[in-house]
Structure formats: C-alpha cells, structure tokens
Amino acid sequence: MFHIKTVMTSHFRWYASDAETVIPPQASYKFPTEASKSEKMTPRIPPKNGGKFSPGDTIRLEFPAQGYVNTRNTTLEFDLTLYGETAKTMRFQNDIHSIFSRVRILYGGTPLEDIIDYNHIHRALGEWTGTNQQGVMDQTSISDGIGGEVMGIGSDGAFHGHVNVRQKYIQGLCDATAPTTAANFTGGLSWAKVGDSEWDPQGGSNTFRVTRRYVVQLGAGLLNQAKFIPTKWMASQFAIEATLAQATDCIYQPTAVAAATATYVVTNVNLIPEILQFDPSYDEAFLAGLNTNGIPIPFASWHRYGFVTSGMNVSLNIQEKSRSVKSIFTVQKNPQTSVLTDSGACLFDTATDGLSTLQTFQYRIGGRYFPASPVQTSQNGGSISNGGAEAYVELAKALNTLGDARLSTSLNTTTWALQNPGTGVLLDRDYSYSIGSISSATGVPTLTKVEATAFNAFCGTLPSQQFAMAINLETTNGVEISGLNAEEQV
C-alpha cells in the first residue's frame, strides 16, 4: 500500500466559469494588525445529516458563510460508545482517528482533499513523529485516545504488571464480574451494562458499553495550514465529510471472538471552528486582493495507492501526476482486516514462517533512481534483518526529523525492522505479546502472549510494528513548491 504526499496550491473564485490559475504558495496577503478591530466566535455546528452514526456512515459538517476560519484552532468533538459482548476484552486501536476511514474537504461539489485510508495515514504519522508510549502516558491520552503500556496493579493490590493504557485508562471493555484470580481485574473506563430499553446495535448480543468524549483536530492539509479560510467570500459551501471505518478496521480484541460482537456508535458530534470577524477596512483590503490576483492557500495533502503483492521481486507502478511530490511512504499492511489484529500496523515483512525478510527497496522516477543505490534491510542479502538503520534514515529525511533526538518517538528496534516470529503471527497485536528472546543465529524473536484470557487485563510490552520504505524528493527547505514534478516524468 502506497501513501504519497503531495502539495498543491489553489485559490477561491467568484464563479466556477472563471479561468483556473496556479499561484506560487509563497505569495501572501496581509494579516490584520494589532490595531484592527476583531471578534472571535467558536460556535458548535452539528452535522447536517443526522445525530447518530454507525460504522460505514458519513458525517457531513458545513462551515457557516461568515468571517474567516482559523483552521489551526478548529476542532471536532464527539461522543464515542464502544459496544461489546460480556467476558470479551476489547478496545479501540491506538489513536482515535482510527474510526475515520476517509476524510474529504469540499468546496461545493469540488473535493479540495480526498484522503482515503485517512486512519492508517494519521496513525502512521503519529507513530513516526509522536511521543513515546512505552512505559509512559502523556496528554495525547486525554483528547486523542493515544496510549501504549504502563505498569499497573491487580484488583487485589498485590500483583503488578504491564497494562494497556487504552484498555484500562482510556476506553476499554472487559468482563464485568469479579476477578477469579489475583492477576485478573477489570479494565476500561466507566463501563455499564446496556438496559433492555436502550439502543443496542447488535440486537441484544452486545450487553456492555463504554462511552468517552474526544476532541480532535483533523489531519487534512487544508485544516493545518497557517492562513485563514475566507468562508464569508466563498461562492459555494465549504464542508467536511468524514466516513466511519468498519469495526474490524478500528477495534482490537486479543481473544478469538467473532467480529460481530464488537461495534461502536458516534453521537453528539460538533464542529467547533474559530471564526474571526474584522472591521470593514480589512474586508476591503481582502476583497481588493481577491479581485486582482486571487488568494493563494497552499497546503500539503496525501494520495493513497494500494496494491496486492506476492513473489520475491515486486515492481509497482504509481500513476501520480502531481506538480510537486514531496515524499513517498510505502508500507505493508495485513490485507485481512480483523478485530484480532491491529490494522494500523505497518509491517517490515509479511512472511509468517520467519525464514525470509525484506531485502532492499528503491524508487525509480522517470529514468532516475531514488536513492542512487538500493536501501539495504538484510544482512548480506540473506534472510536476517540488519536492523533497518538505513531505512530509518530515509524515513527521517522524508519527515524532516533527521538528527533531531529531542523528542522520543514510538519508533525503536522492536517496532521497526524486527523479523516475524515464525509461528504464523505477524507483529500486529497491539501489546498482547512480549519478546522473550531473539535468536542470534536467525534474528527471529520468541514471543509470549500475555494478554491471553478473556478476563486478564495485563498486557505485553511489544507494540504493533511501524516500518516504512520512504524517500524524500524535496530539493529545498519546503518554503516554495519544491517537490519532484510528477507531470514531467515518464
């Protein structure tokens, strides 16, 4: 599966029939001075198409045609209820953005952005650049549902062990009965049994639920650029459409139960934009610029390409024609989505026998190769991983984090280029396992499943894998359009 990051620039027009122009993104318009009179509003805007949403539904949110929207302070809030069968441990995958499979930014009927597999892209970027989640908790657990593992204690107060943060402290379900052994205890936040008069999405099979409110900033490029969106001057409706993922794509269960036993519902959805109103003098200056050269609003976005691969040597053709491709990230995913696996994992190798590994990768664009020599990920072309240091450096270049060790991320030797254990298990099990040892002869790890019973809320220390084959195509510091022009490649 390919995730290709591109950058594009556009402007708003009075009429759809106006000629299309492309304006350099370094062009700018005047921001209001400190002396300008301004007012700020933060209204709560409910969806236009309902109040309760289930997996597969699309939530449509429309911005009001007034003022200027500061997208960097615009958030989306919602209540998320997890429904599950009794005696079954379950939780959402790391990063609550996992419930959004697709995000579109629309200007009338024209999609300015259409990010397919938004949940996987957002998850990967968070794992590659976000804070470390092993042994610690931080502020991202409050509003974004991000958490790894920390030390916890059993219900009897005597037994200690690692616990999954999302399972025990954020939003998880497990058996509600009293523990039968010292190592068993109930996790999850404010669980409650569903009464007969309450809505049950599975018609009675799901008997427990847990609800939590989240407030997130969507990761679309247009919603994270620095300029205000002039919604008061738009000729068409500016809107967001977010499609909810299937339960198998965002919920994890460490025990073998049917996928139909887990589901979720989204309610109390509100878009909270920060809308600014300025005095007439600012509006006049803005309108003058709009009528002359237009208002450029540059932003980076993502194009996703998916492929089914097999065989030893794989060559994939990416049909991309963007004018500025800044970087490419290639990740391997488990094609069989299930609540028993973490669909957000990015695998180093998909062979489950432990006898092979990823050898090399390289990109050919036109007649040129990037990098000039293939990136080596195995020892002397053999079946043992070399640790993937060269591949990590290429990822750091693409993320502009090379040499910056100030922030400890979730990437380490256990989440990067670790080989599969050879027991039919891929490294996509969300802290259900721990590493017992690693063979010095083959590099294959021996795993122990800790989160093994329906009642046990203790977990392992091995997170899901987050490996990527990346390349940086920028030629400058990114202030202007500086990526590779895919339109000119053959």
Image: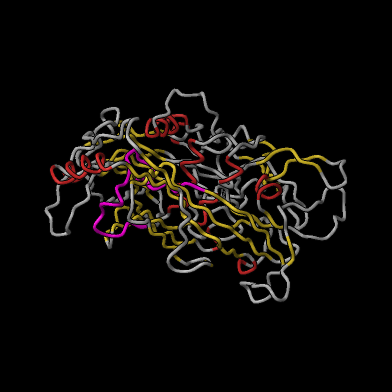
Q: In which quarter of the image is residue 256?
A: bottom right
* Number of numbered tags placed on the structure image: 0
Q: In this view, does 378 lie above or below 346?
A: above
Compared with 106, 471 (above or below) is above
Q: Which of 209 and 405 is in front in this view?
A: 209
Task: Give the image location of residue 89, x and y in percent.
Answer: 70, 57
In depth, the one of 205 and 486 nearer the eye is 205
User: Which portion, as a residue range, is magenta?
Assistant: 216-239
Which x, y percent locates residue 124? 47, 44
What residue is shown at x 48% (from left), y 58% (from top)? 335
Q: Residue at x 55, y 29 (%)?
A: 408
Tell me if residue 185 can be seen: yes
The residue that appears at 36% across and 49% down in the rendered structure is 314
Q: What main secondary structure does the magenta stretch of the protein show?
A: loop
Left or right of 487 in this view: 165: right
Location of residue 332 in the rendering, given as x and y in whole percent from the top left corner: 45, 49
Picture quadrant of residue 454: bottom right
| Residue at the image point whose x is 12% and y is 55% from the top | 18
Q: Is residue 220 magenta?
A: yes
Residue 339 belongs to magenta span: no
